[in-house]
Structures are given as C-alpha cells and as structure tokens.
Image (spheres, rainbow, N blue to C red):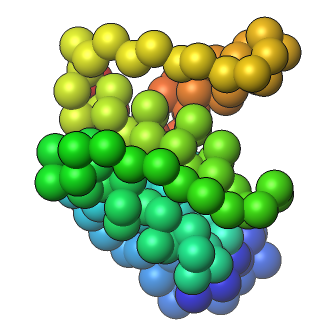
Amino acid sequence: MGQLPDPELAHPDDVRKVQLLKQWLRLDARERLLSHSRLIFPLPPPRHYTLMCRALQKWVFGEIPNLMIFAPPRHMKSWAASWSVPTWILGIYPRAQIMHITHTQAFADRMGRRIRNTIGGDGWAFDEV
C-alpha cells in the first residue's frame, strides 16, 4: 500500500477508500503498533521496520522482558522506539509515565516536540485520551 492520495485530486471512489482505510487504521492502531505507526507516518513501512514494530509491541505487552534493537544508522530506530512507541503507550495507558533518555538534549527536545504534536494532531488514534 503506497502513500494515501490527495482527496482533492482523487476520484470520489478513491476518496471513500482512503476514508475507510483511515478508519480501519484508527481502530487497528489501538491494538497494533504498526498500524499506529502507519497513521502518524503514512508511508509503506520497510520490512525491517515491520519487524521492529512487532518486537516493540511484544516488549510493551511484557511478552519480551528486555529488548535491544541493533541496526545501522538511519534505519528508523528512533521513529519506532522514540516516537511511535511513546505515543502508542500514552494512547493505551493514558496515565503512563515515560522516561525518555537520549544522547543529547537537542534530540530529546526534538522527540518530545514530535510526541506532543502527534498526540495533538489528526493522526492520533486515541481521541478520547
């Protein structure tokens, strides 16, 4: 599945399909980290990102006690672990307290803003939170 088409340029049937896809993703995002990631970053995920999301989801639900992700630079580790997971956890567990530790203050500030903007944005699947 590619990037979602612009509703103003798409055929009316395509607009309806996009709306249904977004509704389905919003419902599925409450149970699956990968669907949540697709809502906040609507591009087709690479296979390694899909595997990372599956492992992170198992970690969040306690199926994996400890998790370390090793991948080369620029392979979306921060997108998955530092952006998608905190926003997803806060949607599932609104009273969760998350400690976000990074190598620099600038990176922490950037990720903190990204998390805040995601929670207040249109792609947020947990509107009642």
Where, quadrant-wise, is the N terminus in this rendering? bottom right
Q: Residue at x 44, y 41 (%)?
A: 85
Decide if residue 23 is in sight here: no
x%, y% of residue 116? 57, 20
Camera-side residue of 15 and 86: 86
Q: Is residue 63 above or below residue 81?
A: below
Residue at position x 46%, y 72% in the image: 51
- The answer to whether residue 114 shows anywhere in this view is yes
Q: Residue drawn 67% across and 62% down? A: 71
Q: Position of residue 87 (x, y in %)?
A: 44, 34
Quarter of the image that includes the C terminus: top left
Residue 120 coordinates in the image, percent (x, y): 52, 24
Q: Is residue 95 left or right of residue 108?
A: left
Depicted 128 relative to depicted 101: above or below = below
On screen, residue 126 above or below 98: below
**Towards the viewer: 80 or 43:** 80
Task: Give me the residue at 54% from left, 19% from top.
Answer: 100
**In which quarter of the view is residue 44 placed?**
bottom right
Count the marks: 0
Would residue 6 be found to the left or right of residue 65 on screen?
right
| Whether residue 62 is situated above or below residue 52 in the rendered picture | above
Q: Quadrant of residue 106?
A: top right
Query: Where residue 86 appears, x then y in whole percent?
Result: 44, 32
